[in-house]
Image (cartoon, grey):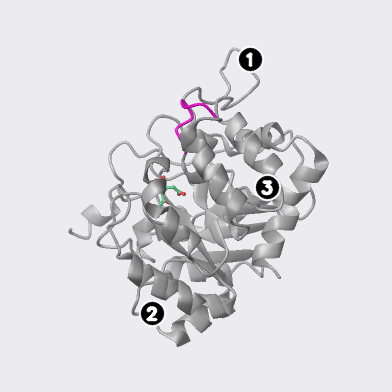
């Protein structure tokens, strides 16, 4: 890939929403956006040569401005596949955050203990294993298990990203991991299936039977078929995703996290207004107590202890 090509966004890629609305839902004091990314800028932190997409630049300054606009106190920045195992953009953002960001890195089997220590000092508290086939190439489970064993003594956890149809073959691997395990985006359920159907109930069972497994109840904009609020005044956004997230928040109130997923990689049909995404939260966490656990207590316990 030539240098010029390396900054051309993937066709159809939507830029993040500019000028998001101010949420009507007031976030509790100390709220954490526990899933967001920084991308580039590509001329400073080049994208990985093996990446599956080229994003828009989404630098730390824009992320921190969004944090303040929405009313979050802190961020958890998650390494995305377009940066591969080069965590420089992430580490730079963590170091500039004044302690208001923690990170989840992606590391390869050649990472040294000294590099892991340096990441820890910068604020990394987890590593991410991505099993979504359109995003990441296959890594043998033994390599991932060895990495999990190496990061466990640091007190880090493993973040996993996969699609619901792949859970049966990954189930045993996840349940044998020695750390806390955080599942991105509710294991990406197919929300056209019933919430009490076998696919989603397999995911519920994973959490019910394994108290070290947590989940992010994030990304309604990725999962929804019904979509955002309509212009004609329909007030409920992403209503087809709500029963799935509600069940997880009610059943596992101490093991759920929420994040914007800004700048929303790979969305091609609509780009959410991040202010309206925050307004979605009370639909899935209807009481002040559930909101406090989801947005304040849980992420602080996992990332800032
Ligand atoms: C997300 C979701 C996506 C992308 C990645 O690492 C990534 O590239 O996670 C996606 O395309 O579904 O959490 O950002």
Residue 127, percent from left and from top: 48, 67
Quarter of the N terminus within the rendering: bottom left
Q: Name the residue beneath numbered marker 3.
A: 252
Residue 213: quarter of image: bottom right
Q: Horizontal and vertical percent for residue 134?
A: 30, 47
Q: Is residue 39 visible?
A: no
Q: Residue at x 70, y 48 (%)?
A: 294
Residue wearing tag 2: 111
Separation of marks 1 and 2 at Cα, in angstroms:
51 Å
Mark 2: is the Cβ under 8 angstroms from ligand 1? no
Q: Which mark is residue 233?
A: 1
Q: Is residue 217 above or below residue 194?
A: below
- The label nearer to you, 3 versus 2, is 3
The answer to whether residue 13 shows anywhere in this view is yes
**Element under label 1?**
loop
Magenta extent: 189-195
Magenta stretch: residue 190 in it? Answer: yes
Q: Secondary structure at mark 3?
A: loop
> In this view of the protein, which residue sits in the foreground, 4 or 165?
165
**Label whose residue precedes the other's in the sequence (3 or 2):** 2
| Residue 298 part of the magenta-drawn span | no
Q: CA distance from mark 3 to mark 2?
A: 34 Å
Q: Which of label 3 and label 1 is nearer to you?
A: 3
Pointer 1 with pointer 2, Cβ within 8 A? no
Nearest the camera: 102 or 164? 164
Q: Nearer the viewer, mark 1 or mark 2?
A: 2
Sooner in the amino-acid sequence: mark 3 or mark 1 = 1
């Amino acid at each position: 890939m030539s240098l010029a090509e390396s900054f051309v966004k993937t066709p159809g890629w939507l830029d993040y929403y500019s000028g998001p609305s101010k949420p009507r839902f007031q976030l509790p004091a100390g709220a954490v956006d526990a899933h967001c990314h920084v991308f580039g800028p590509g001329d400073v932190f080049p994208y990985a040569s093996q990446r599956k997409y080229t994003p828009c630049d989404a630098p730390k300054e824009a992320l921190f401005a969004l944090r303040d606009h929405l009313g979050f106190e802190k961020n958890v920045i998650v390494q995305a596949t377009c940066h591969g195992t080069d965590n420089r953009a992430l580490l730079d953002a963590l170091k500039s955050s004044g302690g208001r960001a923690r990170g989840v890195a992606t590391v390869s089997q050649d990472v040294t203990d000294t590099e892991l220590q340096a990441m820890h000092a910068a604020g990394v508290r987890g590593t991410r294993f991505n099993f979504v086939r359109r995003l990441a190439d296959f890594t043998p489970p033994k390599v991932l298990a060895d990495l999990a064993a190496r990061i466990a003594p640091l007190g880090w956890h493993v973040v996993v990203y996969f699609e619901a149809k792949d859970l049966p073959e990954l189930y045993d691997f996840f349940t044998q991991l020695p750390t806390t395990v955080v599942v991105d985006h509710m294991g990406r359920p197919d929300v056209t299936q019933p919430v009490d159907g076998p696919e989603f109930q397999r995911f519920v069972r994973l959490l019910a039977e394994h108290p070290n497994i947590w989940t992010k109840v994030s990304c309604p904009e990725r999962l929804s078929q019904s979509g955002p609020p309509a212009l004609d005044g329909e007030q409920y956004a992403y209503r087809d995703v709500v029963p799935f997230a509600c069940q997880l928040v009610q059943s596992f109130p101490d093991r759920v996290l929420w994040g914007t997923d800004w700048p929303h990689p790979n969305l091609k049909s609509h780009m959410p207004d991040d202010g309206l995404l925050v307004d979605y939260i009370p639909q899935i966490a209807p009481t002040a107590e559930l909101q406090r656990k989801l947005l304040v207590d849980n992420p602080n316990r996992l990332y800032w202890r």
